[in-house]
Image (cartoon, rainbow, N blue to C red):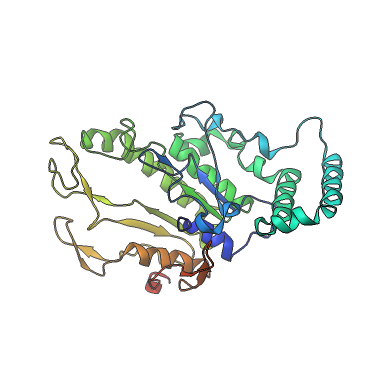
C-alpha cells in the first residue's frame, strides 16, 4: 500500500467537524506519467481519506474549462427533497440493524461514518455552492487569470471559505502533454513568458492577495512548489531526456518554493543558492522539512505515528519543521 498523501494524513489527524468536503484535489487527479492517482490518495489509510477528485466530462484528462466539472453527486435530485432523503437514511439504519453479520464483516470500513458524511454533504449544499464559480464577479475571475489554473486557485479559496481543510491544486496540464505543461524541455523562453509564467503569476498572486484582503491568510497556509527544479544549463541532458537549445532538464538538487500565511513571516527569504542555481550554499531545506513545516502549521506533530494496513507504525515524516519561518 502507498504512503498517504499529506492531505490524507492531515484530515486523518485533524478530522473534519462540519458537513464539507475535507480534502479536494484540483483541477484533475494527480498523475505520474500514465499512472493516475499515484501519490494522490489515502494510501494505506484507506479510501475514506482519498481526496475528492474532479474529472472532466468525457475522456479529456486535461480540463480547459472549470465549468465542465461534474458535481451532480453534491446535490439532491429534483425529485428527492431533504426530508425524504432523511427518511431514506432512517430506513437504511433500520435495515442495517438486522444485518449484524454483515456489519461485523465490514466494520473496518466505517460504512456508517461514510453514509453520515455523504448525507450531511448533500443536505447542506455547501459543497456544491462552493463550486459555483459563476457566483464570482468577472473582475474576480480576471484577477485570478481566468485560466484552468487560476480558476482552480479561486475554487480553492471558495472551498476553504466553506470549510474544506486541505486543497491541493495541481498544474492543469500533464508533463509533455502540450505547450501549457510545465515540463520545459524545449521552447522555454517563449512558453515561460507567454504561457506558464503569466498563468502561475496571476493565479497564485490572486489567491494570496484575495485571502489577505478577506482576512483569511492568517489562518490559511499557501505552499507553491514543484517536485524538482530545472537544470542551470540549457540544452543539456541530466535525466536522460532530450532537450533543445532553449530547454532545461530535470534538476532536483536546487530549486525554490513559496510559502505564505498561517503565521509565516512576510517578505522573508530563507536559504541561498550559488550564482548558477546549481546547489544550495546557505540554509538548505529538504522536501521532508517542508512537509514537516506544513504539518506543524496545522498543529500536527511531524513525528506523529500512523499505522499502515498491516498495523505497522509509521512516522509522518522523518524531519523537523523549520519553525524560524514563523513570525
The residue sitting at 23% across, 64% down in the picture is: 272
The vertical placement of 238 against 325, above or below, is: above
- Answer with left or right where residue 189 lies relative to residue 147: left
Spot occupied by residue 308 in the image (x, y as percentages of width and height): 51, 63
Q: Relative to the observer, which residue lies in front, 158 or 301? A: 301
Q: Relative to the observer, which residue lies in front, 151 or 92? A: 92
The vertical placement of 324 against 1, above or below, is: below
Spot occupied by residue 34 in the image (x, y as percentages of width and height): 38, 38
Spot occupied by residue 271 in the image (x, y as percentages of width and height): 26, 66
- Answer with left or right where residue 125 lies relative to residue 88: left
Q: Quadrant of residue 323?
A: bottom left
- Answer with left or right where residue 269 lies relative to residue 84: left
Outermost residue to the front: 101
The residue sitting at 83% across, 37% down in the picture is: 81
Q: Quadrant of residue 278?
A: bottom left
Q: Quadrant of the C terminus?
A: bottom left
The residue sitting at 70% across, 56% down in the picture is: 105
Spot occupied by residue 78 in the image (x, y as percentages of width and height): 78, 30
Q: How many numbered circles does the render carry?
A: 0
Q: Quadrant of residue 281?
A: bottom left
The residue sitting at 26% across, 70% down in the picture is: 283
Amino acid at each position: 500500500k502507498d504512503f498517504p498523501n499529506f492531505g490524507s494524513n492531515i484530515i486523518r489527524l485533524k478530522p473534519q467537524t462540519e458537513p464539507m468536503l475535507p480534502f479536494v484535489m484540483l483541477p484533475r487527479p494527480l498523475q505520474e506519467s500514465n499512472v493516475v492517482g499515484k501519490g494522490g490518495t489515502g494510501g494505506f489509510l484507506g479510501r475514506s481519506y482519498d481526496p475528492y477528485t474532479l474529472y472532466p466530462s468525457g475522456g479529456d484528462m486535461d480540463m480547459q474549462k472549470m465549468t465542465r466539472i461534474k458535481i451532480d453527486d453534491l446535490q439532491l435530485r429534483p425529485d428527492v427533497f431533504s426530508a425524504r432523503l432523511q427518511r431514506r437514511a432512517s430506513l437504511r439504519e433500520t435495515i442495517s440493524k438486522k444485518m449484524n453479520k454483515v456489519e461485523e464483516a465490514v466494520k473496518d470500513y466505517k460504512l456508517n461514518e461514510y453514509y453520515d458524511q455523504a448525507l450531511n454533504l448533500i443536505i447542506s449544499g455547501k459543497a456544491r455552492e462552493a463550486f459555483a464559480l459563476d457566483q464570482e464577479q468577472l473582475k474576480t475571475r480576471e484577477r485570478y487569470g481566468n485560466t484552468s489554473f487560476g480558476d482552480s486557485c479561486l475554487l480553492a479559496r471558495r472551498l476553504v471559505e466553506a470549510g474544506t481543510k486541505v486543497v491541493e491544486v495541481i498544474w492543469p496540464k500533464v508533463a509533455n502533454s502540450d505547450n501549457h505543461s510545465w515540463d520545459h524541455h524545449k521552447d522555454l523562453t517563449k512558453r515561460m513568458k507567454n504561457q506558464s509564467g503569466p498563468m502561475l503569476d496571476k493565479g497564485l498572486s490572486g489567491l494570496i492577495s484575495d485571502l489577505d484582503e478577506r482576512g483569511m491568510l492568517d489562518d490559511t497556509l499557501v505552499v507553491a512548489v514543484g517536485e524538482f527544479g530545472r537544470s542551470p544549463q540549457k540544452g543539456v541532458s541530466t535525466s536522460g531526456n532530450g532537450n533543445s537549445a532553449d530547454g532545461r532538464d530535470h534538476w532536483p538538487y536546487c530549486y525554490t518554493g513559496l510559502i505564505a500565511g498561517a503565521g509565516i513571516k512576510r517578505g522573508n527569504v530563507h536559504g541561498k543558492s550559488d550564482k548558477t542555481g546549481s546547489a544550495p550554499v546557505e540554509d538548505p531545506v529538504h522536501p521532508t522539512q517542508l512537509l514537516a513545516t506544513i504539518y506543524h502549521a496545522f498543529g500536527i506533530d511531524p513525528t506523529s505515528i500512523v499505522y499502515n494496513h498491516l498495523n505497522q507504525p509509521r512516522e509522518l515524516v522523518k524531519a523537523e519543521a523549520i519553525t524560524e519561518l514563523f513570525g
